[in-house]
Image (cartoon, helix red, strand yellow):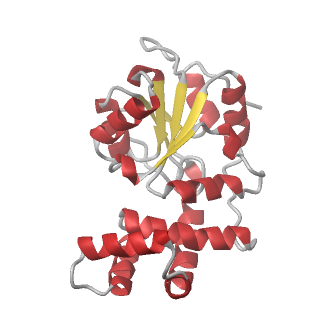
Amino acid sequence: MQNTGSATPRVVLLDIEGTTLPVAFVHKVLFPYARTHLPALLAQQHDNPVVVQALAETAQLAPGVPAAEQLERWMDMDAKVAPLKSLQGLCWEQGYRQGELVADLFPDVVPALKAWKAAGLTLAVYSSGSEAAQKLIYGYTEQGDVTPLFSAFFDLKMGGKRESTSYSAIVQKAGWAPAEVLFLSDVVAELEAAEQAGLQVCQIARPEDKTVPGVRHRVAASLPQAARLFGLPEGA
C-alpha cells in the first residue's frame, strides 16, 4: 500500500521504546539500573539543580509522602511523570559515560534514519523519557553516536503522549505543518492522539517485541516497511 491521498511527509517524529529500540532494553536494562543507582544519586547529588527541582516536583505531586518512597512507587507503576524521568536520566547518564550502558537499536533503524536525513527529511524524537535520556540513548549505541541525525528532542514537557494537545504543541513549537509530519510509534493510543492533531501516523509493530497490531492505522514491522507505505527512501 502506498501513501495515497496524503502529502509525502517532510518530518518524521519517532517514539523510542518499541519503535527504534527493543522494549527489553528499557525494562530489563535501563529501569533496573536506575532503580539500583537512584538512592546513591539522591545522596551524592542532593545539590544538583536537576535533583532539587525533581524532588520539589515530587513533593508537589505527592505531598506528605517521603520522596524516596514516592519515586519507588512510580517505578513500580512505570509512571510517566517528569520528576522520575529526570532522575532516571541522571542515573543513566552516569551509566552511559562509565561504559556500563550501551543501547542496541533495531538493525534497520540507523540505515533508515540516514536515508531519510540524506533525502532532506527532518527527524525528531518524542518520548516519555527526558530529553537528556533520549540524547544518551542515541549518543551511546552499538552503532555509534547517532544524535546528529535528529533536529529536535521532545519529552513530557510538551504534555502526555496520549493527549492530542501535546502533538499540537510540538508542531507549533517546531514550526511544522501537522499534515507534513509522520509520527511512528508502537502504541495505538499515541497514534490516535497524534492523528487528532492532524499528523500522519503509522504503528511500528515489531515482531521481536510481540507488539499487537491495531486495526485503524497503517502498520509496519520496521522502519523500511513504514517508508514504503509513505513514499520515503527505505535505507540500505
Left or right of 197, for residue 231? right
Q: Quadrant of residue 58?
A: bottom left
Residue 8 position, x and y percent, is: 52, 16
Locate residue 146 relative to residue 126 in the image: left or right.
Answer: right
- Residue placed at 33% from the left, 49% from the top? 159
Residue 139 to residue 64: above or below: above
Residue 148 spot, x, y in % from top left = 70, 41
Looking at the rendered structure, the number of numbered marks drawn on it comes to 0
Q: Is residue 21 above or below residue 119?
A: below
- Give above or below for 11 relative to 140: above
The picture places residue 26, in percent across and down from the top left corner, at 55, 64
In the image, 178 versus 45, the foreground residue is: 45
Which residue is most to the top? 5
Residue 57 makes an appearance in the image = yes
Q: Residue visible at 50% across and 70% down?
A: 88
The answer to whether residue 194 is left or right of residue 130 is left
The residue drawn where x is 37% and y is 46% is: 158
Closer-to-camera residue (8/157)? 157
Q: Extreme left residue here? A: 63
The answer to whether residue 223 is above or below residue 143 is above
